[in-house]
Image (spheres, rainbow, N blue to C red):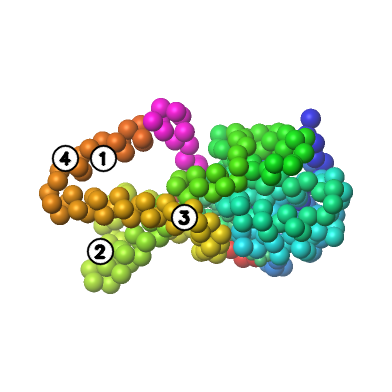
Amino acid sequence: MMAYRRVALIGLGLIASSISHAIRRAGLPVTVTGHARTGATREEARRLGLGEIHDTAAGAVRGADLVILCVPVGAMAGVMEEIAPALEPGATVSDVGSVKGSVIAAIRPLLPEGVHFVPGHPLAGTEHSGPAAGFAALFDNRWCVLTPPADTDPRAVAALEAFWQALGANVEVMDAEHHDLVLAVTSHVPHLIAYTMVGVADDLSRVTESEVIKYSAAGFRDFTRIAASDPTMWRDVFLNNKEATLDILGRFTEELFALQRAIRLGDGEHLRAYFTRTRAIRRGIIDAGQDTAAPDFGRAAQPAPAG
Ligand SMILES: NC(=O)c1ccc[n+]([C@@H]2O[C@H](COP(=O)([O-])OP(=O)(O)OC[C@H]3O[C@@H](n4cnc5c(N)ncnc54)[C@H](O)[C@@H]3O)[C@@H](O)[C@H]2O)c1
Ligand SMILES: O=C(O)C(=O)C[C@]1(C(=O)O)C=C[C@@H](O)C=C1
């Protein structure tokens, strides 16, 4: 049985909208409430039928037994300050931020007595933003990582786990620091590399008169999709996962220099051995059934986030 009867979503973008759609698809007996900063986003959310939309964050969380913060990582603390006085004793606050350590450090001191805090991160998304970008199947067969601090009530963790499973996700519980290191490898640094590669191509296209875009091959197109992701969200990811990102980036640069040297020296053995190793990793992902790209990446480009 679902532990929640009233779920509040704060920040009505891609993730909040997808949660609302997935709740409806699952037929959960819960009332969804929501709040967005701007009137235009609130209007859009109403039009999309995302739930009972309130003009204030405090209004949206009043009476809610689950509150999910769905704003950029750098905006979490400000939102928490705003809602703290309106939270119900016994309610659970969670979030969907892409970084966990800094969000926990920012939110914990602001938590009222008797309110649970179970941080979360669904490992699912697209390059699109805003409420119209959301869709019910986003979390299907994707991981949702929960990073509860050690003293969290296990019943609050179990309830949130059941909630995400009802939305189609597989749940894993891990330490926040470990989460931030793993995500630096699997998501954050890859995004930075994509941003850089597309920037380099853009610089070059001024010389080649847009041929880079015209003749872009599949690999580069994948980079451009990733590099179209929301600038505010990704600025906040890097500013808030500084240590792990810099650690992985340092290792990346060392490997890149080794490959650069192999190319300069004509060391084909090094290149072949390296690419053979990485091919095996890709095959391992497929064999493990984890090549679950989010569906419908081809959808039309969304407008910039409105709220
Ligand atoms: N997009 C992804 O692929 C993805 C995947 C998993 C988790 N996340 C995380 O989910 C969260 C939301 O991402 P999204 O993709 O839904 O973003 P989005 O841009 O689609 O939506 C974010 C919403 O937060 C609002 N917002 C921004 N700054 C705010 C502030 N200072 N106060 C109040 N509201 C503010 C925006 O107006 C917008 O409505 C982020 O923390 C992100 O790291 C994103
Ligand atoms: O496919 C994409 O658009 C994404 O980048 C989604 C992605 C990821 O790296 O997998 C991006 C950031 C989130 O924190 C979680 C998921």
Label 4 Cα neighbours within 10 Å, binned few <14 / some 14-19 / many ≥20: few
Q: Is residue 31 left or right of residue 184?
A: right
Q: What is the CA distance from the residue labelled 4 to the residue labelled 2?
A: 33 Å
In the picture of the structure, the residue carrying the numbered disc 2 is 211
Q: Amino acid at mark 1?
A: Phe
- Mark 1 = which residue? 275
**Amino acid beneath label 2:** Glu
Q: CA distance from mark 3 to mark 2?
A: 32 Å
Distance between mark 4 and mark 3 Cα atoms: 30 Å
Kind of element beneath mark 4: helix
Classify mark 1: residues with Cα within 10 Å, few (<14), some (14-19) or many (20+): few
Q: Quadrant of residue 154?
A: top right
Give left or right: position of 45 versus 86: left
Q: Nearer the viewer, mark 4 or mark 2?
A: 4
116 part of magenta stretch: no
Residue at point 69% right, 62% down? 77
Is 285 inside the magenta-drawn segment? yes
Do callouts 4 and 2 mark residues in contact (Cβ within 8 Å)? no
Pick whichever, 91 or 116, lies toward us.
116
Say which quadrant the C terminus sits in: bottom right
Q: Nearer the viewer, mark 1 or mark 4?
A: 4
Instruction: Looking at this view, name the residue that lies furthest to the left.
Output: 266
Q: Which mark is residue 1?
A: none
- Which is the main secondary structure of the residues drawn in magenta? loop
Tell me which segment is drawn in magenta: 284-296
Residue 269 is labelled as 4
Q: Which numbered disc, 1 or 2, marks the residue closer to the eye?
A: 1
